[in-house]
Image (cartoon, helix red, strand yellow):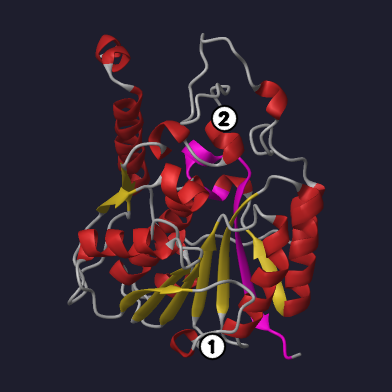
Amino acid sequence: YLDQMAALADDKKAQLREWFASARRRSLPVVPVPFGLTAADLFARPASKSGGAFDPAWKSTSASGYPKNYCGIRYPKNYQYRLGVDFTAAREPFVLADVGVLPEIHGRPRKQTLRLAQQMTEGGIAGVLWNAGRALTFMLPRLPEWREEGRFAGKVLELGTGTGLVGTACWLRGAREVAMTDLPAAIELARANVAANVGAAAGLRVEPLAWGAPLPAALAGPWDVVVAADCLYDVAALPALLRTLGEVSDARTVVYLAYKRRVDAREAPFFADLENLFDRVAFTAPEAVPAEWRGTGLHLCRATGRRQT
């Protein structure tokens, strides 16, 4: 077996690892996700050793033991956990993504694995599947809004959809209406992935949206649930993200942010502002995420009770 693994190309190894990881995740019990940490609790804890931002000093010209990314730069073996993405898999034109065990819902296919196109060279960071998106997809049936009957019947808005995994998973799990959004230059990838995986799906659409810009009529809130995965990496975009979160939410809206802790100095102020916008902002503990991402700085943030301003 080890000889066979060694003979596989890097992309095939990445697919095989994900297949085994998906099988492990599906075997886990569906238990509620606890949100027991405040922002103060989270940032009082030391950052995990593999959860911080990438350090350029780690680059090496040695070929031994260092995988390449698509630019040919060599990184340490744990680079995917520091950056939040496996570049061996991300540089491939397609990636398999596990949605988990799905309930039987009329009009929704029980498609538990999606084949998602990626466009790293054309789409950049928006064109690949990040670990935070996989983790949020795993957690969906463990959230309060899905726990009661195994489905959610309300309206879901996704910000920064990228490849479209999380929004498509919400729709497969029974959300009545799902709008997946991203910058105008990035949405064609998500549209293509929706068409390839679920076809013309009633109640599932992809719309352009730039954070901070006026909301188009098609996206006017409030929404029942707002989701976003790994959208805090660009500090310059955070004020606009906050404005959009405020516009699409009301007192009943629940916001879920799959968050990778990278640089406290730029992320802690964002969550302080989020606490001014919502009555309650809480986080999962590190052990709440699946084992393969545990200790990599991945958390799920839940914000409820949009305040009137």
Task: Quickly name the residue at label 2.
Answer: 79
Instruction: Judge from the rendering whether residue 277 lies leftward or rightward of residue 77; answer left or right.
Output: right
- Expressed as whole percent of the image width and height from the top left, the position of residue 36 reads 66, 60
Q: Quadrant of residue 253?
A: bottom right
Q: Nearer the viewer, residue 216 or 261?
A: 216
1 or 2: tag closer to the N-terminus: 2
Query: Residue at point 57% right, 30% down?
Result: 79
Amino acid type, callout 1: Pro
Query: Residue at point 78% right, 76% down?
Result: 276
- In reply to whether residue 294 is colored magenta, the answer given is yes
- Expressed as whole percent of the image width and height from the top left, the position of residue 169 reads 35, 63
Q: Nearer the viewer, residue 179 or 182?
A: 182
Q: Quadrant of residue 9?
A: top left
Q: Is residue 220 visible?
A: yes
Describe the element under mark 1 as helix, strand or loop: loop
Q: Is residue 31 visible?
A: no
